[in-house]
Image (cartoon, rainbow, N blue to C red):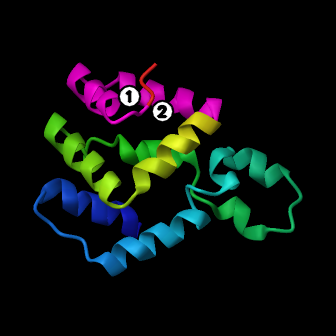
């Protein structure tokens, strides 16, 4: 939740500066979230597995992530997406996200479905920043 609130604030106020300590805290948290193998698995698969790691089933998965990332109340315009992607770069989130998109065919296909629903200018923004667009 904290991550998306920070991104939303950055979208609304592009001049917002993030403290280095907050950036470091978010980077550390990626291991428990997007940079975690459980992130790439649908929750139904996680619940079906008998795992010693009970927290795996509670990881915010890629479906929830994409629903939030492409929600119209977060980014309603090309400029909003541009501000979001700039903030992803500031937080070094883009590196992890792109790596996970390359690692998982299912995540990439779901991402592309959401991306293709956007205007071509938005698709170009992602392409220019080395996100998969096809």
Q: Magenta stretch: give its range.
A: 104-131
Q: Are marks 1 and 2 in contact (CB under 8 Å)?
A: yes
Residue 44 drawn at (x, y percent): 73, 46
> Residue tagged by mark 2?
111
Q: Residue at x 31, y 65 (%)?
A: 5
**Label for residue 115?**
1
Q: Is residue 29 visible?
A: yes
Q: For residue 78, what is the image quadrant?
A: top left
Residue 28 drawn at (x, y percent): 51, 72
Say which element carries label 1.
helix
Q: Is residue 12 left or right of residue 75?
A: left
Q: Is residue 74 visible?
A: no
Q: Residue at x 24, y 41 (%)?
A: 81
Say which element carries label 2.
helix
The answer for how far apart the CA atoms under marks 1 and 2 are is 6 Å
Q: Give the farthest residue toward the bottom.
A: 21
Q: Is residue 105 left or right of residue 122?
A: right
In magenta stretch: residue 111:
yes
Above or below — where is 100 with respect to 12? above
Q: Residue at x 21, y 24 (%)?
A: 121
Q: Main secondary structure of the magenta part?
A: helix
Q: Which residue is more in the foreground, 14 or 72?
A: 14
Q: Which residue is more in the foreground, 44 or 97?
A: 97
Q: Which residue is more in the foreground, 29 or 110?
A: 29
In magenta stretch: residue 119:
yes
């Amino acid at each position: 939740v904290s991550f998306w609130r920070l991104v939303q604030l950055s979208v609304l106020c592009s001049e917002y500066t993030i403290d280095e300590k907050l950036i470091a805290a978010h980077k550390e948290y990626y291991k428990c979230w997007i940079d975690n193998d459980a992130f790439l698995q649908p929750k139904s698969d996680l619940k079906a597995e008998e795992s010693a790691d009970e927290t795996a089933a509670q990881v915010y998965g890629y479906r929830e992530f994409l629903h939030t990332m492409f929600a119209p109340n977060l980014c309603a315009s090309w400029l909003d997406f541009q501000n979001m992607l700039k903030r992803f770069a500031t937080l070094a989130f883009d590196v992890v996200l792109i790596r996970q998109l390359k690692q998982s065919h299912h995540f990439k296909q779901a991402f592309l479905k959401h991306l293709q629903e956007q205007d071509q200018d938005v698709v170009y923004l992602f392409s220019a920043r080395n996100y998969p667009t096809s």
